[in-house]
Amino acid sequence: GAVVSQHPSRVICKSGTSVKIECRSLDFQATTMFWYRQFPKQSLMLMATSNEGSKATYEQGVEKDKFLINHASLTLSTLTVTSAHPEDSSFYICSAPLRDTEAFFGQGTRLTVV
Amino acid sequence: GQNIDQPTEMTATEGAIVQINCTYQTSGFNGLFWYQQHAGEAPTFLSYNVLDGLEEKGRFSSFLSRSKGYSYLLLKELQMKDSASYLCAAMDSNYQLIWGAGTKLIIKP
C-alpha cells in the first residue's frame, strides 16, 4: 500500500540551530502534504499545508519564517525548524492524502531542543 | 465554531467489546475518520465514513449518523495490542481535518 516516509524519527539539537525534517511519498505523487505538530496527550494540530510548486499555506499562529516548508517535488516536502528553542520540542508528523478518503502519515519526528 | 468531542480515556477487558463515541460540529462535512495512535508513533488510518451506517472491517467497525453529528468506533475481541489512543477527525467543507483530542484505551487482562 501507499507509504509516507518521514526522516529523521528522532533528533536532538542545540538551541539556536536549525533542523530539517523530510517527508516522502514512496509510491504515489502528492501535490499536497500536511504538517502537524502534537504536544503530549494532545490532539494533532495542523501547522501548514505544503503545495508542490507553490508557497505553503500556514495556519493562524504558525510562524512561517520559523517553520520553513519546501515542496520541491511531487514526492518530497521538507519542514525546517529554524533557530530552534526548547519550546519547539514536540512531535512533528507529516501526512499525504492519497484520495479524499484516506491520508497516510509519516512515522513522525520527535524533536528535542536542548 | 468547529468542535470534536470524544472521551479522554476508557478501560476495557481483553476479549471484550468497546465502543468509542465521537460527536462533531463542523462547517460543512466531507467525512469522518478514525485513526489509531500508539504512544510515540504516528497515527494509522482505521476507517472513513461519509454515508450514514455501519462500516465493518475485521474486528473494527465504524458508524456514522450525519443528522446527529455522531460516530462511534467499535472494537471487538479486544487484544492487548489494541491499547492505544483513538483519534476521531471530521473533514470540513474545505477538506481540512478537524481533530479530536483522542481517547486513550486501556486494555486489562
Image (tube, coloured by chain):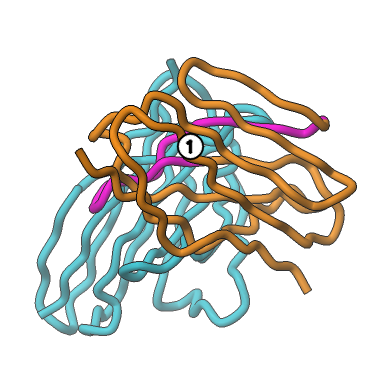
In the rendered image of this protein, which colour is used for chain A? cyan
Q: Which residues are the magenta region? A: B35-51
Residue A47 shown left or right of residue B52 in the figure: left
Query: x, y (%) of residue A112?
Result: 16, 70
- In the rendered image, the quadrant that contains the N terminus of chain B is bottom right
Magenta residue check for B36: yes
- Tell which of A71 and A99 is nearer to you: A99
Q: Which residue is mark 1?
A: A73
Chain the render paints orange:
B
Give the secondary structure at mark 1. strand
- In the rendered image, the quadrant that contains the C terminus of chain B is top left
Q: Is residue B58 above or below residue A7?
A: above
Query: x, y (%) of residue B43?
Result: 40, 43
Residue, far right: B67
Residue A32 shown left or right of residue A13 in the figure: right
The chain carrying label 1 is A
Q: Which residue occupies 89% across, 47% down? A: B67
Q: Is residue A107 above or below residue A17?
A: above
The answer to whether residue A8 is seen in the rendering is: yes
Query: x, y (%) of residue A107?
Result: 30, 42
Q: Which residue occupies 51% across, 38% down? A: A96
Residue B14 shown left or right of residue A114 in the figure: right
- Tell which of B73 and A94 is nearer to you: B73
Residue A39 falls in which quadrant of the image?
bottom left
Q: Is residue A38 above or below residue B22?
A: below
Amino acid found under the numbered disc labelled 1: Ser
Q: Which residue occupies 45% across, 54% down? A: A70
Magenta residue check for B46: yes
Residue B47 falls in which quadrant of the image?
top right
Q: Which residue occupies 41% across, 41% down? A: B36
Residue B3 falls in which quadrant of the image?
bottom right
